[in-house]
Amino acid sequence: MPMTPRSARGTTPGPPRTGQPAADASSRPVPVIDPYAEAVLQVVEGVGEGRATTYGDVAEVLRDAGWGGGPRSVGAVMARHGSAVAWWRVVRADGGLPVCDRSEARARHLSEGTPLTPGGRIDLVRARAVLDPPIVSGPRGSVTS
């Protein structure tokens, strides 16, 4: 099923962090998300309930599709735009939950039945998602090996 780019879905930013009241939604500009960020979010949208992936897994799928960047680049996109997708499903390579809100991430994983280790990390052996590439290839095109 084709996906509509996030910038065309009418996504608007949250209220300003300055304590000022939010502007009327009709007067706020629709944010433009760069193509790399859009590709990251498309890959993350494909992670289903009860599953998880790592920042590195997302970066690898993007590299195979011709995008650059590594796990830290994916993390930067998730920090800025991750609230638009199931952010809690992207974890560290050791299964550690996202640092932005571990308790919320844990609650969501428990409600979805995501397998956890006794130490509270995601059991990536059982929960790792198989990722689909983004719809649009990166500037270098699809890389085949």
Image (cartoon, rainbow, N blue to C red):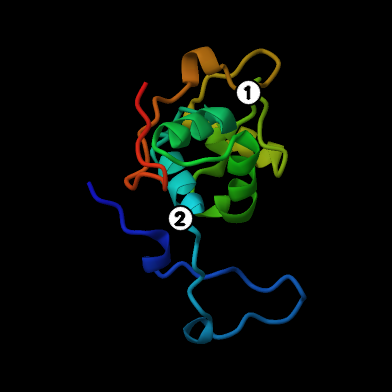
Closer to the camera, 84 or 131? 131
Numbered disc 2: secondary structure: helix
Residue 110 seen anywhere in this rendered image of the structure = no
Q: Residue 8 placed where, x, y %?
A: 37, 67
What residue is at 48 percent from the left and 14 percent from the top? 126
Residue reaching furthest left? 1
With 58 as the anchor, is 64 left or right in this view? left
Residue reaching furthest front? 140
What residue is at 53 percent from the left and 19 percent from the top? 115
What residue is at 58 percent from the left and 33 percent from the top? 55
Residue reaching furthest right? 18
Which residue in the protein does label 1 denote?
A: 93
Crowd band around label 2 with a 10 angstrom C-alpha radius: few (<14), some (14–19), many (20+): some
Tag 2: amino acid:
Pro
Q: Residue 35 bears which disc, if any?
A: 2
In this rendering, is residue 57 above or below 72? above
